[in-house]
């Protein structure tokens, strides 16, 4: 499986999905997407409720059974703990079931490591509020750790964790049974409830001298300190004072609740990104529903003045709600719980521009102190997140742009050195194969992406033909600008119909402006040499230098859109999650 080939003959089947038209408004909408992202609009976020029970806890009380409380911490990459939650105290039970649940935001793009500790609360403190208890004055019953991903990917969304002694505490001469902590996850109903709204403008004021405005709407939620964060937008409608926009889909979870305030801004699109505000209103989803039922419009407001002299001028321009419906949508986590998996693949650039791997100035240099180079770091950080969604943890791994032993320069060779199979075992297997390949291939060039994309597409196509519940994620790590740009576009357009997303990490100091063309966030949808347009955006590109010193990690920047790309593929193909028989 997964043999590399590079004749560029792969063509994907299937229909062009939503957004596959090459119109000027599509270009404008991609520019709006970029505008939104620059203002903080981001991807999927779900609220998860965790409930807790335990079995066979240790009995630390003399007369009665333990009085147990569970405490939840988040554990950082450096091992630091931050307390998040305390349950109530369940009296006199070695098999407690706690009533108080813990709500946590699930973020796909980071590894959320949780630590659970169970304490026996001393009788003298049982009338105290849980948050006032000093834990070092209570008896420790055991602890367990896991990631949130491990819980939500189980078919029954439940894990039974063996309670252990505290880390750093010496083991007893006789092994002790500390019991089990059972953690169950439920996705909030608000995460699944979607509203579909059709908005219409009437008599919009013109911001253009010789024509009507090119209006679009940006819908933002209000967060702390009154800051608006964009959560959705409409398409741009050219030269239209009375626009009727396509339906806007908003999850209740996205906006907080049906009563959370939303700011709806009507903007006149400008190609330079400096869009003019026509007017705005502030309403909740509940308010919009009432406007729809009453058939009434609302006048847009235009802020005038600054500071204490700020006023809102009421405009003749109006906004109407022509449609308001609520539906329950399948979520990313529902697909995972029904057996869908994300399968990780990696392709590594071995072109000569990386430098001699034996020298410290090479991007491939293996530091004897153990400090990871940029390639290793990208593999580990992306792999750490994706491995939880892949049950067998056997990952296809390729290299490109080098001359393996006894064969010509290859733009897709198996990283493990095999001529028959490309898979390795786990993230450590990728690291071992990478380290071995460094000194068993001769660095060459040029930098071509087409062959490795086609190899990944072949695996995804075969999986699709077998109706397998798999979605593939290819990580390409490179130090240079590609020389087969059009061939790469052709491969990506074909692959856009397959269960496949592609993450590209640029390392080193190259100018990656051309590479950003491949990422649909920053321009037009990709078009093949035959004129076919990609059915969806499947590429996310990040230059490591742009974010390595910032607040957002390379993993978060790369993976933030992946759940949305997954859901777009499933919905375009009308694939629904099925309840697992287990």
Image (cartoon, rainbow, N blue to C red):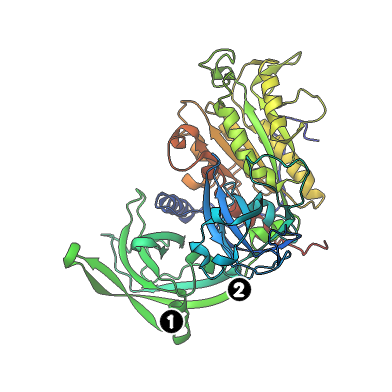
Residue pictured at 64% horizontal, 22% vertical: 401
Q: Secondary structure at mark 1?
A: helix
In depth, the one of 305 and 334 nearer the eye is 334
Residue 178: which disc? none
Quarter of the image with the C terminus in it: bottom right
In the rendered image, is residue 26 in sight?
A: yes
In depth, the one of 395 and 275 nearer the eye is 395
In the rendered image, is residue 7 in sight?
A: no
Residue 327: which disc? 2
Q: Residue furthest bottom?
A: 294
Mark 1 → mark 2, Cα distance in angstroms: 19 Å
Mark before the other along the chain sequence, 1 or 2: 1
Q: Secondary structure at mark 2?
A: strand
- Classify 10 Å Cα crowding around label 1: few (below 14), some (14-19), many (20 and above): many
Residue 291: which disc? 1
- Residue 437 location (% of width, % of height): 69, 20
Is 433 on the left or on the right of 221, as rendered? right
Residue pictured at 77% horizontal, 64% vertical: 579
- Classify 10 Å Cα crowding around label 2: few (below 14), some (14-19), many (20 and above): few
- Residue 245 location (% of width, % of height): 46, 68
């Amino acid at each position: 499986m997964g043999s590399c080939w590079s004749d560029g003959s792969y063509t994907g089947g299937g229909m062009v999905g939503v957004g596959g038209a090459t119109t000027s408004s599509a270009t404008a909408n991609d520019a709006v997407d970029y505008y939104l992202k620059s203002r903080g609009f981001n991807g999927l976020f779900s609220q998860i409720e965790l409930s807790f029970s335990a079995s066979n806890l240790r009995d630390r009380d003399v007369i009665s059974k333990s009085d147990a409380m569970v405490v939840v911490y988040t554990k950082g990459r450096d091992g630091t703990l931050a307390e998040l939650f305390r349950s109530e105290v369940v009296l006199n039970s070695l098999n407690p079931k706690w009533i108080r649940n813990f709500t946590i935001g699930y973020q796909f793009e980071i590894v959320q490591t949780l630590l659970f500790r169970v304490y026996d609360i001393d009788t003298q403190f049982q009338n105290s509020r849980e948050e006032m208890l000093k834990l070092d004055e209570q008896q420790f019953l055991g602890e367990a750790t896991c990631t949130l991903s491990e819980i939500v990917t189980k078919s029954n969304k439940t894990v039974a964790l063996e309670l252990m002694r505290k880390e750093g505490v010496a083991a007893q001469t006789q092994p002790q049974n500390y019991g089990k902590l059972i953690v169950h996850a439920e996705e909030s109903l608000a995460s699944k409830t979607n509203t579909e709204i059709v908005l219409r403008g009437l008599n919009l004021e013109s911001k253009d001298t010789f024509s009507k405005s090119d209006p679009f709407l940006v819908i933002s939620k209000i967060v702390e300190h009154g800051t608006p964060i964009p959560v959705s937008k409409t398409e741009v409608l050219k030269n239209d004072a009375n626009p009727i926009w396509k339906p806007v889909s908003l999850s209740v979870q996205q906006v907080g609740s049906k009563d959370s305030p939303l700011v709806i801004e009507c903007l006149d699109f400008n190609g330079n990104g400096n869009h003019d505000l026509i007017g705005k209103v502030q309403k909740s989803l509940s308010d919009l529903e009432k406007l729809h039922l009453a058939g009434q419009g609302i006048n847009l407001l235009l802020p005038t003045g600054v500071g204490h002299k700020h006023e809102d001028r009421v405009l003749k321009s109006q906004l109407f709600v022509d449609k308001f419906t609520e539906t329950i949508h399948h979520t990313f986590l529902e697909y995972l719980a029904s057996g869908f998996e994300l399968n990780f693949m990696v392709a590594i650039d071995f072109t000569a521009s990386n430098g001699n791997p034996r020298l410290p100035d090479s991007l491939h240099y293996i530091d004897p102190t153990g400090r990871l180079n940029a390639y290793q770091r990208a593999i580990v950080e992306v792999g750490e997140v994706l491995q939880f969604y892949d049950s067998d943890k056997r990952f296809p791994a390729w290299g490109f742009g080098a001359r393996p032993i006894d064969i010509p320069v290859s733009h897709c060779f198996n990283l493990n050195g095999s001529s028959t199979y490309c898979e390795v075992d786990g993230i450590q297997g990728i690291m071992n194969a990478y380290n071995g390949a460094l000194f068993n291939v001769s660095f060459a060039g040029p930098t071509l992406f087409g062959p490795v994309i086609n190899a990944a597409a072949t695996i995804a196509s075969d999986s699709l033909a077998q109706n397998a519940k798999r979605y593939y994620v290819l990580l390409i790590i490179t130090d240079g600008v590609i020389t087969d740009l059009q061939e790469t576009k052709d491969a990506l357009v074909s692959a856009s119909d397959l269960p496949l997303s592609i993450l590209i990490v640029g390392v080193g100091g190259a100018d990656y402006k051309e590479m950003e063309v491949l990422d649909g966030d920053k321009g037009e949808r990709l078009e093949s040499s035959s004129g076919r347009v990609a059915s969806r955006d499947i590429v996310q590109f990040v230059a490591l230098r742009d974010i390595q010193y910032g607040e957002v990690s390379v993993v978060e920047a790369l993976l933030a859109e992946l759940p949305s790309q997954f859901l777009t593929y499933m919905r375009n193909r009308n694939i629904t999650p099925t309840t697992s028989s287990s």
